[in-house]
Image: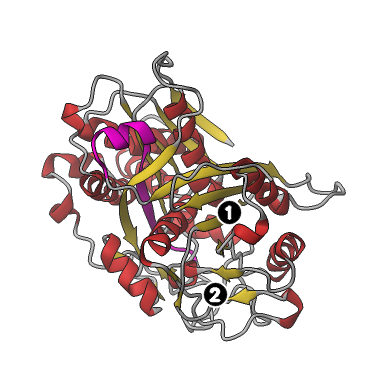
Amino acid sequence: MTTATREAPASAGRPATARAVFTGIGVTAPNGLGTEAWWAATLAGRPGIRPVTRFDASGYPATLAGEVPGFEPKDHIPSRLLPQTDHMTRLALTAADEALADAGVDTAALPDFAGGVVTAASAGGFEFGQRELQALWSKGGQYVSAYQSFAWFYAVNTGQISIRNGLRGPSGVLVSEQAGGLDALAQARRQLRRGSALMVTGGVDGAICPWGWTALLSGGRISTATDPARAYLPFSADARGHVPGEGGAILILEDAGSARDRDARVYGELAAYAATFDPAPGHDGEPGLGRAAELALAEAGIAPAGVDVVFADAAGVPELDRQEADALRRLFGPRGVPVTAPKTMTGRLSAGGASLDVAAALLAVRDAVIPPTVHVAEPAAEYALDLVTDARPGPVRTALVLARGQGGFNAAAVITGDARPRTHH
C-alpha cells in the first residue's frame, strides 16, 4: 500500500480513542449523479453499465463500463479549475462539495488545521498520465515517467479538495486498489484520534480511457460479455469477470464529540477496521479476507450473529468468489447472513468502490433496507450464500463491508447505526 500524507500534531485535548461518525455523503456513480439519485436507482435495481462512450472501445475485447451519467463539468466546477483538472478530479470535487453541504459544514469556520483530506485512488492516474503523454507527443517537452504521472495525479486529486475547501489539516492518499476505499477511512480515523475534528475521506476513481483500459485488460479479470445483464455476475455459476466503472463516494468522517457539539446529523459510526494481506504468490496459506473480517468484528466487539448485512467484495471471478464465499461461510455459517453486492449496478470502481459500499451501508441503516444484487437470480449452490437479489426491508444496525485490491490487499470495516457502548465478545 502506497501512502502520501501530511500530519498535524496531536491535540492533548482529545482522547486517542475518539469515535468517528459519518455526517456527510457525496456520490458520483454510474447509476446516479448525487446521493439521493444514486440511492433511489440502487434500491430500484437500476444498473448503470452500458457500452463505453468516453472513447472508442470497439477494437478492445471488453466494451462495457459503468460511466457517470449526465456529468457536465461546467455545471459543477468553477471555470478557472477546468484547465487544471481531469475527469476523475472533477468527479471527486463534485462529490466532496455534496458531502460537505450534506454535513452542514462551513469549512471557513473551522479552526486552522482542524479539517483535513484523506482519499484513495489507484486507476484514475491512467487518464492523467495519458493526457500528459499526449501533450508530450504533440508538443515535445520533458519526459515524465508513469510513476511520476500517477503520483502527481494522486496529489492533485486530494490537493484540489483541500485547496478548494480551505482544509489545511492532515492530508493523504492511499493506493491499494479496491481496498483503498476502506483504507482511506481508517487513515482518516487515525487523524481524528490525533486531534483533527473532521476529515474529508473516501474515494472517487476510474480508468475509462485507452491507456487505463489496456492496463485493466492485462489483469485478466475483465468481462468480455457484450450484454450488460450478463457481464458481471458475482457468485453466479456464470461468473466471467467484472465490469470496470468510474466514480465512488466522498464521506465526511467526524469526531463524535465535534459532531455532537454542532448538533450534526449522524448517519452512523466507523466502529472498526482491519487490513490483511494474502500470501505471496507461490506460498501456502489462506487468503486474508476472512481474517480481516474477523479482526474487524473483534475490534467492534460484535459477534457474527450481530451483523445484519455483508457488503461483499464480489470479484465476479470464480476462484475469488469461492474464496470470499468460503470466508463468509466459516464466519457466519451456511446462508448465515444476508449478503449483497450493489456494485453489480455500477461495476467495480477501483478505489471508489468500497467507499460507495460504505455509503450504501449508511443509507441502509437510515432507511432500514438492504439494497439488492442485480442480474444474479440465484448464487451457485456450492457457495451457500443468502444473496439479496431484491431490496429487502428490515432493521439494519450493523453492516460489514469487505474489499480486496489486486496485489493481495484485503480490508474490512464495520459500520454501525448508533453509538451504544460496545462490549467485546
Q: Which residue is mark 2?
A: 232
Residue 117 shows in this picture: no
Q: Residue furthest right?
A: 284
Q: What range of the chain is rendered magenta?
A: 244-264
Vertical position of residue 196 compared to residue 146: above or below: above
Residue 311 shows in this picture: yes
Residue 258 highlighted magenta (yes or no): yes
Earlier residue among tags 1 and 2: 2
Which quadrant of the figure contains the N terminus?
A: top right
Give residue 408's position: percent from left, percent from top. 68, 47
Vertical position of residue 120 compared to residue 166: above or below: below
Give residue 316's position: percent from left, percent from top. 61, 69
- In the rendered structure, which amino acid carries the disc numbered 2? Tyr
329 left or right of 106 in image:
right
Residue found 69% across the figure and 46% down from its top: 425
Residue found 77% across the figure and 62% down from its top: 330
Task: Residue 403: give its label.
Answer: 1
Mark count: 2
The residue closer to the viewer here, 247 or 198, is: 198
Question: How many residues crowd around disc 1 within 10 Å: few (fewer than 14), some, or many (20 or more)?
Answer: many
- In the rendered structure, which amino acid carries the disc numbered 1? Ala
The residue closer to the viewer here, 19 or 355, is: 19
Q: Quadrant of residue 311?
A: bottom right
